[in-house]
Image: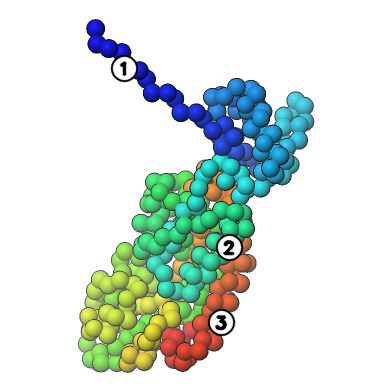
Amino acid sequence: MPPTVPSSPRPKTDVRATVARVLLTREVGQRIPTVQELQHTSHAGTGTVIKAIRALEANGSVTLSSHGHQGTLVVARDVGQLWNEAQLGNFSLIMPPPGPVEQQGILETVQGSLARQGVPVIAVALAGARRRLEELYHERADAVVTSAGAFAHHREDFPGLTSIDLGASTFYSAGSLVVVESPAAPAGARLRVGIDRGSYDHQLLTETEFAGQDVEFFEWRFASAPAAVLRGRVDAAIWHAMPTVISPALAGLSVRPVRAETLERIPEVSRAVLVTRGLDAGVNALVRTVLPADVAKTQARLLKLAAESDLDAAEFPPR
């Protein structure tokens, strides 16, 4: 008979962390599970569960009130404290590629809001709203930022995702969408236009802006539109204006705002949304501390700083 292989000892469950995770799913005024239910969830005894609840009350993570047959209700809770007690670690956020002031403002606001909850934010950048939403859907991030238009376009492919609208002009501020053109483009010839089909926003903006014109589209990354025009790869491309060492205008390119009619037809692309998984109660409790008014205020401050920079005003594309 072959020797019996001893089984590995089952790792101890951190009951306090388990209870904290459960309490993150309960809003103020809601009933928490019974001690017996928490025993089943945490695989712990009655005394251990009660001790964990009392410890969370003692350190201010939650305030509870017993109401007899109605159960125990949440009177108050500290979302950040519960998140840390639940040992959920850093908050993972996926942003669009860096550069635009609007994205910097969103990131600064999210990091500041969660820092006040005692939760650090780890942010990474990834081009393409669909790719960001895929990462979120497959639970490789806690939240992502996209335009409201891109989220609405893709959301049927990612059931269960939800969003917080950060407000008008928070993804693209007024005047930040511009068309960069080469003054050397031959008059009357078919216009070569750069388009980033990996970006829902850029494809929609480009096709709307140049609708009805004699153009030929060439694939190019949204963020490097000025480089595409400078290198002669295309004659024109839409760009999300941002501070640069040498502005497109100083480099000899023409820069004009995207037509008002384009933005009127697709206003949803200018709004930023913070997207999460709808059933992720802890994450959603945290992101509700990110106020759209704070995002707008931070972006306005950063845009003003950019405009008042010591650099020559021409260093910044027109807004």
How far apart, in angstroms, are the residues tagged by discs 1 and 2? 52 Å
Q: Where is residue 185 in the image (x, y as percent from the top left)?
A: 25, 89
User: Tag 2: residue type?
Assistant: Gly
128 left or right of 263 in image = left
Of mark 1 and mark 2, the one earlier in the sequence is 1
Cα separation, mark 3 vs mark 2, equals 19 Å
On the rendered image, what quadrant is the N terminus found in? top left
- Residue type of the residue flagged with mark 3: Lys
Give the class, few, some or many, for how many residues have Cα within 10 Å of label 1's Cα (few <14, many ≥20): few
* Residue at the (37%, 61%) spot, across then down: 126
Residues under numbered marks 1 and 2 in contact, where contact means CB atoms less than 8 Å apart: no
Going 55% across and 28% down the picture, which residue do you hit? Answer: 42
Number of numbered tags placed on the structure image: 3
The residue under label 2 is 112
Element under disc 2: helix
Q: Which of marks 1 and 3 is in front?
A: 1
Q: Is mark 3 on a helix, strand or loop?
A: helix
Nearest to viewer (mark 1 / mark 2): 1
Give the labeled residue for mark 1: 5
From this view, report whether residue 101 is shown above or below residue 152: below
Q: Looking at the rendered structure, which numbered label has been put on residue 304?
A: 3
